[in-house]
């Protein structure tokens, strides 16, 4: 294990905090509680609301990123969106299924998703301020790795409470949202205290107007950043598949297997296993990137997901779900971590927020396709099993674009 600076440790701890949100709200607890509302027709409809949140975040990302590149602005944006995400997550606890107000639950979910994704624009961009190009693959991988393993703690506590209080009762899930919000806030404090913006643009009198001008200039200079935008094109497709599987694994598994074959506790236990497996595998991807390059390991991750999608179509028993979860967990952290570090090394440091705004908009707009496609396919065919195959072309297109990028990641 490499020796970490105080700034690197503080940055990694944010992943430890916000990964609890990704696990509890995006993937596990919210989809189950959403399905408890009597006036909700299909749990797969959650895909539509995931897409709405993605559209809102994607629309805001570039302008926010450009504005945050000015001196002393990055942390202010980071704190604002983090607080929005934490408070909205806690608010989910106060809307039980008995209220019948699923619309209000979705409103707070969308706000929490905006807070989570918005804070991640600036969190990801801070990687250029806390470490060097040579250490980025390792530091980014450690962030995802410790994020996955640390999220097991609040999720595990929530799972025990849900089991003790009753799997079919909402109170355990509601307490889980409170635990998640507190955990997220606690692990964000070191980042706020110890990390400062190193790379920045000097402020102007009219920063909003100048932010739009800088965005326009970046588009005009697109040829100069050919590798950056080529990567974003590939990322747009393959990360869509990754995010879709993260967001829709619960609705898909439940729809395909049925509640009789796959009870709620088993499903949540599988998600716990995915988190545990993702911890060493993310570190492994970081180590292998140093030996074989981040580009090579991202390609390995893409093909692991293609195989997982094919396998998901044929699942017919609980042990199949466990194996599938292990396959997903082996690639999930690695492909996310190395995508982040690869991108950070090919962008200009003083425009890190602006470019990570693009990174986020490509990621969030891509996340519109997958969940919507799965929901529509299920509605048209009446069989959720077919929806998983629609994700494979996204990985293939992403691969065909990405394979053309150079191993020498410092080139633009």
Image (tube, rainbow, N blue to C red):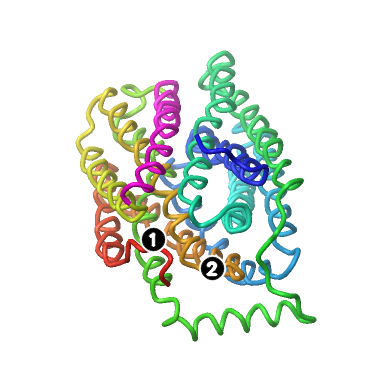
Mark 2 closeness class: few <14, some 14–19, many ≥20 residues within 10 Å: many
Of 353 and 57, which appears nearest the observer?
A: 353
Helix, strand or loop for disc 2: helix
Q: Is residue 133 visible?
A: yes
As measured in the structure, the alpha-carbon distance from the residue carrying label 2 to the one carrying label 1 is 14 Å
Q: Secondary structure at mark 1?
A: helix
Which of discs 2 and 1 lies nearer the camera? The answer is 2
Label 2 close to label 1 by CB (< 8 Å): no
* Mark carried by residue 355: 2
Residue lying at the far top in this picture: please name it.
164
For the record, the magenta segment spans 264-292
Residue under pointer 1: 235
Give percent across and percent down for residue 113. Answer: 58, 50
Assign the magenta stretch its main secondary structure. Answer: helix
* Image point (59%, 21%), residue name: 157
Left or right, residue 166 beside residue 81? left
What is the residue that sits farthest to the right in this orientation? 205
């Amino acid at each position: 294990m490499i020796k970490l600076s105080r700034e690197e440790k503080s940055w990694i701890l944010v992943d430890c905090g916000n990964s609890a949100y990704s696990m509890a709200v995006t993937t596990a607890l919210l989809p189950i509680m959403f399905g408890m509302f009597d006036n909700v027709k299909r749990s797969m409809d959650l895909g539509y609301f995931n897409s709405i949140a993605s559209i809102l975040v994607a629309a805001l990302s570039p302008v926010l990123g450009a504005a945050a590149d000015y001196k002393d602005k990055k942390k202010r944006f980071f704190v604002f969106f983090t607080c929005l995400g934490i408070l909205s997550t806690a608010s989910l606890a106060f809307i039980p299924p008995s209220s019948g107000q699923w619309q209000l639950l979705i409103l707070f979910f969308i706000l929490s998703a905006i807070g989570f994704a918005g804070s991640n624009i600036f969190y990801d961009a801070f990687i250029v301020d806390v470490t060097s190009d040579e250490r980025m693959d390792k530091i980014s991988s450690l962030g995802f790795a410790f994020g996955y393993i640390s999220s097991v703690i609040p999720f595990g506590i929530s799972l025990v409470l849900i089991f003790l209080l009753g799997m079919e009762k909402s109170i355990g899930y509601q307490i889980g949202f409170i635990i998640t919000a507190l955990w997220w806030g606690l692990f964000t404090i070191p980042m706020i205290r110890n990390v400062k913006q190193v790379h920045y643009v000097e402020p102007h009198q009219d920063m909003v107007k100048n932010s739009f001008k800088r965005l326009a200039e970046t588009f005009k200079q697109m040829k100069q950043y050919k590798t950056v935008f080529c990567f974003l094109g590939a990322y747009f497709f393959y990360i869509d598949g990754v995010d879709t599987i993260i967001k829709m694994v619960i609705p898909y598994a439940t729809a395909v297997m049925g509640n009789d074959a796959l009870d709620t506790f088993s499903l949540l236990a599988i998600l716990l296993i995915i988190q545990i497996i993702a911890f060493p595998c993310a570190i492994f991807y970081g180590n292998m990137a140093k030996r074989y390059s981040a580009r090579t390991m991202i390609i390995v991750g893409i093909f692991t997901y293609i195989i997982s999608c094919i396998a998901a179509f044929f699942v017919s028993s609980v042990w199949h779900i466990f194996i599938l979860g292990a396959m997903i967990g082996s690639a999930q952290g690695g492909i996310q971590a190395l995508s982040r570090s690869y991108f950070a090394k090919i962008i200009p440091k003083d425009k890190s927020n602006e470019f990570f705004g693009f990174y986020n908009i490509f990621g969030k707009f891509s996340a519109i396709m997958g969940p919507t496609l799965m929901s529509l396919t299920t509605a048209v065919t009446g069989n959720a099993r077919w929806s998983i195959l629609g994700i494979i072309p996204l990985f293939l297109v992403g691969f065909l674009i990405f394979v053309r990028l150079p191993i020498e990641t410092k080139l633009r």
